[in-house]
Image: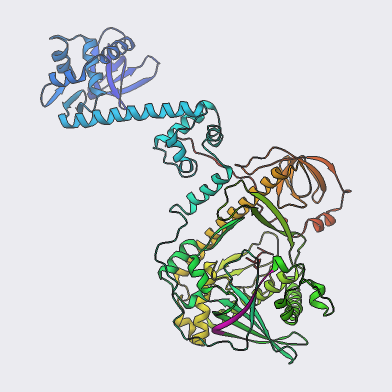
Amino acid sequence: MFVLFEEAGKYLGGRVLSEAEASAQVELDTGKRLKVKGANIVLRFEKPAPAELIAEARTLAATLDLDLAWEFAPEGEFAFAELATEYFQANPSLVQQAAALFALFEAPHYFRRAGKGRFKKAPAEIIQQALAAIEKKKQVLAQIAEWAAQLVAGECPAPVREQLYKILFKPDKNAPEYKAVVEASRTAQRAPLELLERAGAIDSAYQFHWKRFLFENFPKGTAFPAGLAAPAVADDLPRADRVEAFSIDDSQTTEIDDALSVQGLGSGTVTVGVHIAAPGLAFAPGSPLDQVARARMSTVYMPGHKITMLPDAVVQTYTLLEGADRPAVSLYARFDEGTLELQGTETKIERVPIVANLRHDRLDGVITQAWLEDASVSSADTPEVVNTLRARLSFLFRLAKQLKAQREVVRGKPENFNRPDYNFRLVGNESEPEGSEQVQISTRQRGAPLDLIVSEAMILANSGWGAWLGELGVPGLYRSQASMAPGVKVRMGTRSLPHAGLGVKSYAWSTSPLRRYTDLVNQWQIIAAARHGKTAALAAPFKPKDADLFSILSGFDAAYSTYNAYQGGMERFWTLKYLQQQGIGELTATVIKDIPNGALVRADTLPLVFPVAGQQERGAHLRVKLGEIDEIALDVHGTVIERLDAPADEAAALDQTGDDDEEDVAGPIAIAVDLSESETGTENAPA
């Protein structure tokens, strides 16, 4: 005897080996044996064989008119054999009964299950809704198939193009656009990005990187909310009458956060002022401007463009622009003029006269070490304002060298400035780059006199204020490094701890409140300390162990890392573009790291790290032929032509490549789509 029975939502047939009161031992055609409950058996028969019966019944079931079957079906609950009697004939055959069973079972939108082999008619309105949904699904599937075919053929449908970044980076796996890309990728045996690129979905490599960054970090765009005004400083601040402050920045800098002043030259005691723009005096935590700044956490820099943390009108209100008195939080440090020993510090909240905005990219060739150290050295190209400031700049340079030397004693070894900073200029770009601009890359040696003056002054302020907040028990956002041992990285926290890489006992970013949210937060805390002294911990906006402070720390760390990675990626993009524009096919480079089947090398004259094939000695100097450039993946590989130096011992190789070769470097990007259906040396770099 054979039986037809339900098992795990399917109907199977088999031969009965034995039967008990409530179950039967059944053998399938595959030889597998099952224990089947009696209640699950719906048909018993002698012939035909189960496989033959099921095949014939399914063929017949496919011909059933479900609308007609629904009309014929009895009201209330009914068995499948009853429908077979109404639909086929008075005494339906075994095949007809099984066909009715399969048709009922596989049409849940027409018939609802009411038990084993029993069903109930669905309401007419439910059937209409279900049929509409089924038709819609058919149309979607047809659309997916059509889009997939177009992608395979090298054409990108408009809906897929519009969803490009969502498909690649934050996909909705139920969206038809995503499913079309998945289907096309499988059919064409190509990675989704390659498939979309070949189909013309990416018009511009630059726009691809830019729009991806906006999609992931500024999904609502980069515009600021309307109506954000720059409030005036409410306090009647005293004017620093004897101060003549000047800033030192790049020509493209609009967020001038810091300025310097020098008083008392020739008196034996010289007071150096570090004056920081004070937006923290105008708006408080929780205000609309604060909410905007906190959402962004930092200004985003890239060649030819930037996304500011604060609206331009607000920046212009508080920036330390020359020719006016500007609100500032000032750190005054007194030094013995002869020995340069620090005698004390004082913090003031005041209006500071800004007499000049110096631009180092225009003055590095004028304000040299010789010009600063030898009064007889002169230049006809020196602007008059610079000549006026010469004595003050000379003192600041002498002080900067002393402060750096003191830090290096604590640090345990000299800071290594063996590689230059690279500056990018896009010719023809007046607002936002389009990716086709002519790129110019220039170098500026790290540790140049003006750079050293600014960086040491900022370290003096950041370490001084950080230590002061710690002494008062006022929490802040600190950067620390436990030691210079390999693998020990700079970390952020709310406690005053040493920064081994800089050689200071405490370090809290406080000198860039217009472009970094951590500095703005610390400025609020410093203002409270300046106003309330020993009771500042009670008056400061952020209290010890404040959960909000930890939230800010975490959010800033993530955002700042993301922004820096994007800046590095865009600098790499423009470097690769420079290679193409200049027709550069070969470079000289130095090996910095071993990688599987090759080595990473750093170009000698460009900000570019890339892999070469074959194992190479660390520190080796090579001539390399460049391969094909991939602007989407930001990738280029090299082939070694020749070695330009003699093999060196390990110590020499380490010395040649510097002590920061293990730092993160921008490299090729990886873009993958899930096809399943369901610090040291950069802490105070000028802005």
* Camera sees residue 46: yes
Depth order, front residue of 86/169: 169
Residue 576: x %, y % from top left: 67, 46
Residue 414: x %, y % from top left: 77, 68
| Residue 114 drawn in magenta | no
Task: Reply above or below: 268 against 463.
Answer: below
Where, quadrant-wise, is the C terminus in this rendering? bottom right
| Outermost residue toward the right in this view | 646
Describe the colour scheme in one phrase: rainbow
Q: Residue at x 66, y 45 (%)?
A: 577
| Outermost residue toward the top in this view | 47
Decide if residue 494 is on the left or right side of residue 334: left
Residue 155: x %, y % from top left: 50, 29
Q: How many marks?
A: 0
Depth order, front residue of 436/346: 436
Q: Residue at x 73, y 39 (%)?
A: 597
Depth order, front residue of 251/217: 251
Task: Reply above or below: 70 against 582.
Answer: above
Residue 654: x %, y % from top left: 80, 56
* Quarter where residue 194 is shown: top right
The magenta-colored residue range is 348-359
* Camera sees residue 22: no
Assign the magenta stretch its main secondary structure: strand
| Outermost residue toward the bottom in this view | 267
Depth order, front residue of 385/554: 385
Task: Reply above or below: 375 against 131.
Answer: below
Where, quadrant-wise, is the N terminus in this rendering? top left
